[in-house]
Each structure stands twice: as C-alpha cells, then as structure tokens.
Amino acid sequence: MAYKYKNLNIEKLSVIGAGQIGPDICLHFAKVFWKNNVEFVIVDISEEALANAKAKIEKKISRGAESGAFKPEMAETMLKNITYTSDYDAIKGSGIVMEAATEDGKIKDIIFKQVEALTDDSCLFLSNSSHMQPEVIFRNMENKKRCLVTHYFFPAERNPIVEVVPGKDTDTQITEDLMGFYEAIGKVPIEVGSSYGYAIDPIFEGLCELAILCLEKGYGTVKEIDKMAQKTLRQGVGPFTALNLTGGNPITNHGLEEMRDTHIDWFRSPKTLQEATENGTMWDTAKRGEQVDVDPEKAEVLRKQFLGGYFALCCYIIDLGITNVNDLDMATEIALVISAPFTLMNKVGIDESHSLVKEWCEEHNEFPFPKSLDQAKADGGWKVSRVITKKKDNIAVLTIRRPKVLNALNLGVLTELKEEIVAAENDASVDGIVITGFGTKAFVSGADINMLAALKTPEEGYDNSHTFQGLINTIEECKKPTVCALNGFAFGGGNELAITCTARLAKKGLPVVACQPEVNLGFIPGAGGTQRLPRLVGVDIAAEILRTARPVSGKEAAEIGLVDKEVEGDLVEEAVTFAKQLVKGEVQPRDFMKSGNGEDIMPKEINIGHLSKKIDEIMNKAIYDGIKLPLNEALELESKLFGECILTEDMRIGLDNFLENGPRAKADFKHS
C-alpha cells in the first residue's frame, strides 16, 4: 500500500546519508507512513555509519514504545520497514530520494548522478543541504524540474519547520504539491528563494558569529554571553550551547566563510571559531542548574548587541526578497526556538528597534542598514499576520496559521481575520470565502487560555465576550458566502467561529471535529456558542453538547447538521467548489433561526458528572432564555452571563487546574 498525495505516489522512500540528520528524517517518515507500509531505505558507503544509524533509530523507537507514544504494532512496523544498506541499487523504485550527505558539492553531484540513473521520471529528488543552492547541487541532473532542497532543522523528527527551496528549473506545480505534502504529514513548510544558506541559517549562524565577536571584544565570557543571548531573545538555549549540542562548529565555520562571498563582508568565521573547529574543542558553557550572574552594565551592552544584531539579520533576509515577513516571523521562532523577530520589534517599539539596529550597524560597519526596516518605521511597525490569504478561482482562502498553538484564537488573530474578510467582501474579483486552519490536527484549538485567565471582573468578562462576538459577527454579516473547511478539530472559539459561517465541510473520518470544552474550565462559551449552536442543531442536542463538553465526531456532526458534509479528497478544493455552488444557488445553506421562538423550554435532565453545578445553572440561563430572544439580544445575554462566571469560585478553580495540570485533569469544583 502506498501513500498518495495529489501527484505524489510513494511506495518506497530512500535517504542517502546515515550521519546525524539522515536517520532522523527517515524516522519521521517511518512514523508518519507506518500504516501505509511504505518501504524505507537508508544508504551510506560507510558500514559503521549505517550501524550507528540503525542503533540510533532503534533506540528512539524503543523509547517511544516504552513511553506509549508508539503502540507495539506501530513500533514493530517502523522497525521492519527500514532497510540499511551500502548498495545504491536498493533505491530503485523510490518515489522520493532524500540526500542528507555532507556539505560538499562534488559528493552531492556524484550521488545525484547515480540516483538519477537508478530511478524513473516520477521520482522526486530532494537535498537536505543546509546551505547550498539547488542550482549548484543539481547542476548536472537531466531532470531538473523534479529537484528541490528541503532543509530540515535539528532535531529533524520533531522540529516541524522545513525550508522548501526550488531551483530556477523546478516545476512550480511540484513545489506547490511538496508544500502541501509536508503540511499533510505534520511539518510546517515555508517556500524560500534560492540563496546560499536560505532564510534561517544566516540568522542562526549570524547570531553565533555575533556571540563569538562579543567574546573576542571582551563584552563577556562564554557563559555570560550565552545567558544574555538566551534571556534577551528568549532562546531555548544560547548560541554557544546550540553549537555544542548540534556539533555545529565545522558547518558554521564553513557557512560563515561562504556567506562572506555570497552575501556581505560582515559574515565571516571569527578567529576563535576557526581555532575551535580546527582543535575540535567545545565551548565552556554553563552546566545544568549552574547559576550565571551578569553585571548590569555588561548585561545592557550584550542586550543591545543581540537585539540590534538579531533585528538586523532578520531584516537583511527580508531585503534579499527570498521570503516574506509572515513566514520568517513564524519559521524563525519555531525552527530556532527564539522570539519571533518582527513581532518582537513591534513589541520593543519600531522606533526603538530602528535605533538599536542603527547603533549596531555603526559598530558593525560592514553590515548595511536594512532598507526594509526604514519602510517598517515609516509604516508604524511591521505588518505581521497569522491569517494567510490566497485566491483560488475567485474564492478567497483564508488560513489561520499558528502551528505552535494549534491555531488558537486571540483578539489579534480575530482582528486579522476580520480585516481579511472585509477586504475579500470589498474585492469585486472575489465571489466567496473559505476559512480553514493550518495543518491536519486542528482547525482552531480554542481561545488563548492565558488571556481568559487574566480576566478579573464581570465587566472585563463582558467586554472580552462582546469583543470576540463583534469580530466573529463579521463572518455572519459578510454579504458573500463563507465556507469553513474543518481540517481538524474545532474547540471552543474555533467551533463558535465555524458555526458562524454559511456552511461547514469537514475532513472525513475525524474522531473529533467539534467540542465546547468551556464547562471543564469553569465558564460558558462567550463567542456565540450558547446561542448559535442551539439555532443550528436544535436546543436539546446543543444543550447536551454544551453542558457536558463532550466531543463530537465528524460522522455525528454530519448527522446532526453541525457540518454540511464530510470530504474524502482535498478539503480546501472541495470547500472552494462548495463556495462556488453557494454563489450560484446550486446548494442552499442550512436553516438557521435568527429570531427567538418565544417559547418556554425547560432544561432536560443531563448527568454533568463532576462539572460545576453553578456554571451549569448559568449555562442553562444562556441556552433556554437566549433561545426565546432575537439573535442579537441573545448574544448580549451570553456576554453578560459570561461576565457572571468571573464572580464564581469555580471559574478560577477550573482555569488554575487547566494551567497547572493540563486539559485532562478534572477540576475539583465547589459548585459556587
């Protein structure tokens, strides 16, 4: 059985290179495709490297099985499906060949000439180079249309970012398909123009260079510089620690020297890095738990160095024109575990950020002041959006993309969504709108819990609910049809957003497509859920879902009318088609009651288990008093009742329990 994605049909996937990253790439593929019985081959000329790769993969699979991450059948299948060999003939029949060998153009050229001779015209040729341009790597390939760089980040099986770098001869449809393929298998791809080091490595290696220059200038010790870089930029680890963990001295030394020729003169390998590379020495970083104190005056110097340098490096990449602000802001944060650069500049203040970079560039005079930062200052800040808009056949497709938090909503995201909806509504070339989420797991995982936990008074609760409602109401008020493409589960505010759309389509077979989990946390929905859900699926069904917080499967959602249909094929394409049918009147949206029915309906007996009786009382008021009112008045009632929840002891108990113990732990409600 093969894995199929659009024009990609994968029965066998080969990885060439059994060094540090190749086995991890193979492990990720094996994990994703274990049910498809895809055959995997790791090829290397070194038997020792193959043995090490086998031991490494087996150890990681064993750990996964012990922790319960891999069920026994999954672990056994993954182990069985991987072959380790020095025989290049084993790659015959591969749908994808991924090269992960050393950063040497001659070696890569030899590898790909062998590979092309052993595979057919349907094979995709990928290189996990960290620096080299595709035009260099694939210069002697016959079929350059099927050649791309796909740059993974450490650790490759867990770090979701992949830079997809097509060459000048790469087929654009293949690039588009590969971007969708990576999203479908759980990665977060960004397309990057061909440039040495691509978009992210010049930032990482530039920060490493900066740290070493600070050391050479006497601005601090290795430990002090590492700590201040980590603290200032909110890095997972400082640059020196990162070099130690990844064994990155040699490749950073080489990369910086190459970037001096391919980029600007500022990039260069400092003498201290050259010596460390030559001697094979590690950096004297702090041990686990070791306290590092930095003198305030020294700390301020280092803070300015790292803010100025980081901002300058990221703006330089934008000036190159190989990526965009939205992609680089997201990908840098995730790939390098560091503050999102353009968001951080806005937070620091665009004038202050501009001054920091100007001062830094005056000291580092080989680094040109970035033109894009001048423009950002003139614009009053960077425009960073988590809603990505594309147009397909006169339909605007809006994708909520916050993969780090499973597309969770906050006021910023909803404001961006409102802006995009208004823009699409006012665009004469747009007939309808599709709203979806990035990835395959979640459409929207809910609202930002920290934002809700910060609410202290009923007035703040009312205002929060009212603001959320106002932003989401933009969807309902839109004069063009809106279709929600549920690519994964919609929790809380995600479902409230979805049920505001004209129609909903869901990927077929989702075990959970919707849930209103608010009562688990000690409050009621505040973005329209208590009012729109009963009007869409009926009071009794909605009340049971709202009061118990139980999840709804895709199958049940279709049966009760929560979604219009389940989709087996490409979800977004189907949603675009459905939007066109709505425009033409070929399909009709479900009936939705906007005016109240005026009837008194009594709550049914429902077993709410451990959940708060006090919150259930407020929920019943929202549902059963609200259904009698016109929708606009009912939404006002919901906001007031959401504010009432702030006064309860149980809302604080529920939120504290969630933040401290996670979503699976039951809160000990006091029913007050």
Image (cartoon, rainbow, N blue to C red):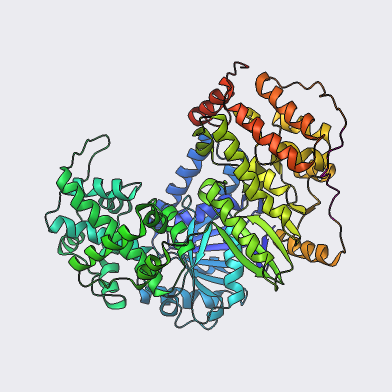
- Viewed as shown, does residue 656 lie left or right of 21? right
Total marks drawn?
A: 0
Residue 261 location in percent, x, y? 27, 77
Image coords of residue 13 (percent x, y): 57, 62
Residue 305, image quadrant? bottom left
* Residue 39 in view in this figure: no
Q: Is residue 590 magenta?
A: yes
Residue nearest the viewer, comparing 497 with 59: 497
Residue drawn at point x = 20 percent, y = 39 percent = 292
> Where is residue 572 drawn, in percent x and y?
70, 61
Between residue 307 and residue 352, name the one nearer to us: 352
Q: Position of residue 334 (x, y in %)?
A: 44, 53
Inspect this view and state whether residue 391 appears: yes
Image quadrant holding the C terminus, namely top right
- Residue extent of the magenta highlight: 589-598
Task: Assign the magenta stretch its main secondary structure.
Answer: loop
**Residue shown at the point (68%, 19%) measured from the top left:** 613
Q: Which of the 4 image quadrants contains residue 650?
A: top right
In the picture provided, is 127 more to the left or to the right than 626?
left
Left/right placement of residue 488 relative to residue 402 reads right
Quarter of the rendering occupied by the N terminus: bottom right
Q: Decide: is 435 above or below 115.
A: above
Q: Is residue 439 above or below residue 492?
A: below
In this orientation, which residue lies closer to the viewer: 300 or 321?
300
Residue 642 magenta-highlighted = no
Q: Say which of 378 and 405 sits in front.
A: 378
